[in-house]
Image (cartoon, helix red, strand yellow):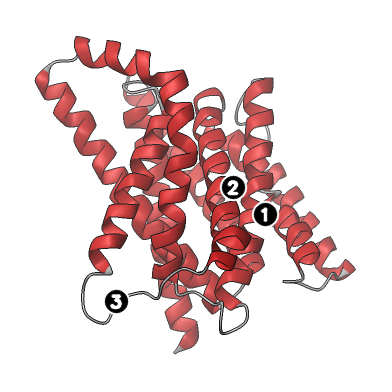
Amino acid sequence: MKILHIAFFIVLWYFLSSSIIFATKWEITDKFPFPLFVTFNSNLITSLLAVVITKFPGCRQRPLSKESFFKFVLPIGACVAVEIGCSNVALKLLEVSFSTVLKGSAPIFVMFWAVILGAEVFSWRLMASLLMIAIGIGLATAGEGEFKVLGLVLMLISVAMSGFRWALTHTLLQGAEEGRMTPLNAMLYTSPITGLFVLPFALGFEIKGIVGLVAELSTAEKWRIFAVLSAIGVFVAFLLLTEYTLVRATSSLTVSVAGIFKELVSVRVLTRKTLRTFCES
């Protein structure tokens, strides 16, 4: 039963993540090119949903201790903000296929941070396996996209921060009983922090562009963008909850390895859709 439980959440995770990637790439990148605001909006919606859910009986969460806040929640929020912000900006500069090549190195970063934090035990056999996976996914998508240096650097920063926050999340969800959090608890406390970290950058770099764009859009276009942003926010909320559930049931390294296969699926779907669109045009 546990295997079926984990398999269900992995499939759900694949679906939610792929939906977010494609919605961002095809509905937001060209029509609303403000990735930092998209990140802030998604975390705002996630925070609101978490607050609403925890009001129901049986879902109430215990208070956050000062130690957990400074040791886990604050760093995780900062890492997620940098990770998603850099990834969203990089997605504007890179093809999804090349982004996948870079994300293929994520398990190596996860293992590096997990070993430092004591969440995993170093093994040369495991390291060799992760390197083979990273090389394999690179070969599978080689030559499928061009890239810009800035996009490359931003995506690598995103992957490195992803590895750090996965290792922190692993410790937070599977650590000592007195400090261990539930997935909902973790989402409730990390999402607002992530949004607060992103907000100053969104205001500083994108607010003028947003105001100018909104002034030019028709009412129908405004509602369309609002609906897409809201949908992405809801998907991000359930994606985060699914990720935390998987980390607690398995490990951060396991989820990271599963994630690169998800990226391969995304590339194949994107390639087929792009080819079909080209042939029909």
Give the position of the C terminus as an image quadrant.
Answer: top left
* Residue drawn at point x = 75 percent, y = 61 percent: 111
For residue 164, which numbered disc appears in the image? 1
Q: Is residue 40 above or below residue 75?
A: above
Comes first in the chain, label 2 or label 3: 3
Cα distance in 3D space between marks 2 and 3: 26 Å
Query: Of residues 224 and 61, which is closer to you in this image?
Result: 61
- Residue designated by label 3: 59
Q: Which SS class for mark 2?
A: helix
Q: Is residue 274 above or below residue 183?
A: above
Whether residue 275 can be seen here: no
* Disc 1 to disc 2: CB gap under 8 Å: yes
Cα distance in 3D space between marks 3 and 1: 28 Å
Quarter occupied by residue 180: bottom right
Q: Is 2 left or right of 121, judged from the image as shown? A: left
For residue 79, which numbered disc appears in the image? 2
* Residue drawn at point x = 81 percent, y = 73 percent: 121
- The residue mark sitting in front, 3 or 1, is 3
Quarter occupied by residue 253: bottom right
* Residue drawn at point x = 48 percent, y = 67 percent: 244
